[in-house]
Amino acid sequence: MAKRELNGDPEEIKAAIADLQGKVAAKNAASEESYEEETYDEEAYEEEENAPTVEIAVKNFEDRINDTVRLGNVGDLINEAEEELEEQQRYEEEIEAEERRQRREMRRRSRMESLKKERAAEEAAEPAPRKIKRNKKNKPDDDIIIEMEGVSKSYVKGVPALNDVNLKIKKGEFVFIVGDSGSGKSTLIRLLLRELKPTTGSIWVNGYQVEKLRRGKVPKLRRSMGVVFQDFRLLKDRNVYENVAFAQRIIQVPIREMKRNVPNILATVGLAGKYKARPDELSGGEQQRVALARALVNRPPILLADEPTGNLDPKNTIEIMNLLDTINKNGTTVLVVTHNDKIVNDMQKRVITIKNGVIVSDEEMGGYLDED
Ligand code: ADP
Ligand code: MG
């Protein structure tokens, strides 16, 4: 038989081995006794094993296979061939997995694309918020985000809770609204939110003319404003995460975005570690932080806070006020109704003072007006 090289093709090796195993087996069957002896001859076995491989290499293929069988290496050859096959299989599986991954990615991308198109179409279909309408001598001012013009509100005829209020607040301002209990501060906030309509006068918020807005457009107006109150108004039977996520669910933010937004805003208000807690497991200061996170998670341009520290101790009051300041410095217009004269004097912001429904002072970097 001519000398052949094992060229590494697993199929060829397997076939050759199978063929020759048959032949070897036949040979061995013919001289079974001597084969047994030979195999268990320790000395000969070791001699063969230590023989230089060069010697083996020059033998013809049949001899080589015989040696391999005798030296107990046939398993190695078969294992090698099988390993090669397995590797090939693994490689093919990897390629298939990669192809599947790419097909998934393409499907995801095309879904995102069509979602984007849908949104763009929706936005194009929605009329832009009505521009502030003015007569010619009173041009609209683009950097004004809140404006009241001659606003009065009477709950009972002839008894105004607010009386001829005029004010302008610029984008990015921080404004305190102060005044005695019953002076009309909450009424002002409720007018901005269109919880009430003014008896007379006009109100503009973020480009919407509030008192003229049709009922169906009110939710859009309200999305311009996050609101917090003295009594927090959290959902008692929901944890922190759910209380904040709730605001996102209302405006149907996709789950994937929500899962990013909620932890982000909780981190901003310093509550990242408490997302599982329920309101009754939190301090007042922490509850107000949750309320702030809920007010801000939808990124409104305006934050309204009606006595946000009214139920808090001095330490928490300062912390919440500092947080409001940070939120403002990040670009949100902030309106804070408060009784806290010390805070107002310390923070050096614009201060609008209301007395019996009338603005009696409006000062940049102001202080709390003493009532005496
Ligand atoms: P503040 O928030 O400054 O304490 P409010 O705006 O709550 O003041 O109240 C201003 C005035 O309007 C008060 O005299 C109050 O009694 C009255 N008022 C507030 N809400 C109502 C209402 N829903 N019905 C009747 N009167 C109200
Ligand atoms: Mg009030």
Image (spheres, rainbow, N blue to C red):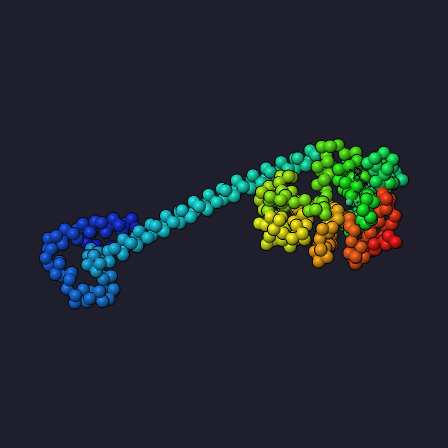
Question: Where does the image place residue 303, in percent across and percent down from the top left?
Answer: 73, 47
**Of residues 357 and 325, the one drawn nearer to the viewer in this rendering:** 357
Confirm whether residue 296 shows in the render.
no
**Of residues 262 and 24, the one drawn nearer to the viewer in this rendering:** 262
Q: Residue at x 71, y 32 (%)?
A: 216
Describe residue 110's horizontal placement relative to residue 357 as left or right. Answer: left
Image-quadrant location for residue 160: top right
**Of residues 145 and 346, the one drawn nearer to the viewer in this rendering:** 346
For the C terminus, give its image quadrant.
bottom right
- Location of residue 308 with respect to 124 vertically, above or below: below
Question: Where does the image place residue 28, in percent across and percent down from the top left?
Answer: 13, 54
Q: Residue at x 68, y 53 (%)?
A: 285
For the N terminus, give its image quadrant.
bottom left
Q: Give the total of numbered labels.
A: 0
Describe residue 138's horizontal placement relative to residue 232 as left or right. Answer: right
Can you tell me which quadrant of the image ligand 2 is in? Answer: top right
Question: Where does the image place residue 297, in percent across and percent down from the top left?
Answer: 66, 46
Q: Residue at x 30, y 55 (%)?
A: 80
Question: Where does the image place residue 35, in percent across and percent down from the top left?
Answer: 13, 58
Q: Residue furthest right?
A: 137
Confirm whether residue 313 shows in the render.
yes
**Of residues 17 and 141, the one drawn nearer to the viewer in this rendering:** 141
Q: Residue at x 42, y 48 (%)?
A: 94
